[in-house]
Image (cartoon, rainbow, N blue to C red):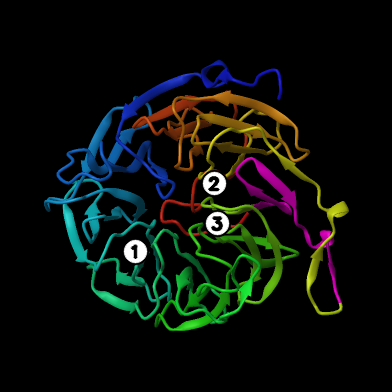
Amino acid sequence: MSSVSGQSITKEFPLKWKQKIGITTYRTNIIEDDGFVYIGSNGDDANADLDERDAVYKIDARTGKVANTYASQIMGDNDVTGVALYDGKLFFGTDNYYLYCFDEKSGNELWKFKTPYDVESVPVVEDLDQNGSAEVVFCVQHHGVYCLNAADGSVKWVLDSISSHEGNVAPLVVDGNNDGVLDVVCGFRGKPNSSKTAGFKMAHYGDYLMALDGKSGLPIWSAPTGAGIHASPFLYEEQGEKRIASLDAYGEFQELGVDGQLIKTIGFGYSKYMSPVVYQGYLNLSDYWIYIGDDAFEKQENGFNKLINEKAPEHSGTMNGAKSATTLVADVLGTGAQQFISVSESGDLYVSDRNGKALKELKFPTGAEATPLIKDVDGDGKLEILIASLDGYLYCYETKSEGEVFYGQFRWSNNNVPILK
C-alpha cells in the first residue's frame, strides 16, 4: 500500500458539486453533451413501483443543478439504466418493458416501443447500413436483440430465436465482413455445443459471442464462451487490425478478429462484469492489468497461442470490495502520460501507471458499480471525474489536469459507438 492509501478523494480532487439522483448499477453509463450531464436512475428503491426518482437526469455540469428529467408516464417499475444521445434525441429503456425516445430540448416523448421484458442494456444509435437513417439497437432481458428505426420506433429487425441472456450487454457495432454495414456483436445464451464436463463445470453452458448482420439481423458468426457474458465487448486495434475483447462471467477472456476468429484466450477469476479495456497491449480489468500484446504469445503446434508469463507483466492493485466498473484510461494527474483509473463498490479509487505503480489510492463515499465519466464537462479546460455512488448521489470532482483522455466513458461516445484512437 502506498502512503496515500485511504486518503479522501477530495484531498487530491476537490468536490465541485453533488446531486441526488438515486440508485445506479454496473450497467449505467454517464454521458455529457453541450455542458449537460445525462444519467439514468433506478430511483430510491430498484425493486419499487411508482418510484418518483425513476428517470433520466439532465444536470448542469457547471452547477450540478437538475435542468430536466425524462421519465415514463406509465405506472410501474420505470428504472432506467443505459442512455444514448443522437441528433437531439435521447434514447433509454426501462424495467417496465419499454424503449423510449425523447426530444432532448423540449423533454417531450417522441415515441415508445413495447418490449417483452426489461431493457437493461445501454442502447446503441447509429446508421448501421449507411442509408441516411439511423437505427437504435438494444438487448431485452431473457429475449433477443432489437433493431428499430430511430426516427419513429418502427421495427427494422429482431433476433429473438436466441436469448441475450440477462440483457446486460451493451451491443458493439463494427463492420465484421467488410460489406460497409455495421454489424451487431453481443452475448447470447442458446443450446450447449457439448454435454461433456470440464473439471467441476460443464464444458459449455450454451453461451456465445455472436455477430448479427446490421441490415438484416441474421447471424454472421458465433464464438462459444465458457459462461454467460455480462461484460460488454470492447473494440481496439492490434498490429493495425481491429480486434474484439470479450470477457465472460467465469473470467475467460477472448480476443477475436472482427470476423469472429479466435486469436487468444486467457483465464481469470469469477464474477467479471466490467468491460475489458485494452490500451497499447495492456488488458485492464478494474485494478488488475496484464500485457497481452502479440509478442507475449507463442503459437503452439496445435495452432493455439500460448501466453508466455515472462513476456506478460501483470499487476494487481489494492482495491477492496467487489469491482464492477470498467477501467478508464486518461491523464487525470496531468503528467503527460495516460493512467489507469478504477473504482470499487467499497469506495476505493485507484490510479496506476503502465509499470504497475500505484499513483493514487483514494476513498470516495460508499462505492460505485457504474463506470465513472472522465471529461472536461463544464468547459473550464480541466478534466472532471464524475462518479455515481451507491449512496444515490452523482459526484463531480475537479482535477488540475488538461491532459488527454483515451477512454473516458463507458462505450466510447454519447451514442455508444466505438471511437478508435
Image-based side of 316 in relation to 61, left or right:
right
- Neighbourhood count class around disc 2 (C-alpha, 10 Å): few under 14, some 14–19, many 20 upward: many
In which quadrant of the rendered image does the N terminus lie?
A: top right
- The location of residue 372, given as percent across then percent down, is 48, 39
Decide: marks 2, 3 in contact (CB < 8 A)? no
Count of numbered circles on the image: 3
Specify the segment rendered in magenta: 278-300
Q: Amino acid at mark 3?
A: Ile
Q: Indicate the quadrant where residue 339 lies.
A: top right
Report how far apart the C-alphas of labels 1 and 3 lie in the structure.
27 Å
Report how far apart the C-alphas of labels 2 and 3 lie in the structure.
16 Å
Seen from the viewer's position, the closer of residues 347 and 124 is 347
- Neighbourhood count class around disc 3 (C-alpha, 10 Å): few under 14, some 14–19, many 20 upward: few
Say which residue label 3 marks: 419
- The location of residue 244, given as percent across then percent down, is 61, 65
Q: Secondary structure at mark 3?
A: loop
- The location of residue 56, given as percent across then percent down, is 27, 44
Q: Earlier in the sequence, mark 1 or mark 3?
A: 1
What mark, if any, has residue 174 been given in the picture?
Answer: none
- Say which of marks 2 and 1 sits in front: 1
What mark, if any, has residue 141 been given in the picture?
Answer: 1
Say which residue label 2 marks: 326
Residue 139 versus residue 120 in the image, above or below:
below
Residue at image coords 36%, 72%? 144
Q: Amino acid at mark 1?
A: Gln
Q: Secondary structure at mark 1?
A: loop
Report how far apart the C-alphas of labels 2 and 1 lie in the structure.
21 Å
Image-based side of 397 in relation to 244, left or right:
left
Residue 44 versus residue 249 in the image, above or below:
above
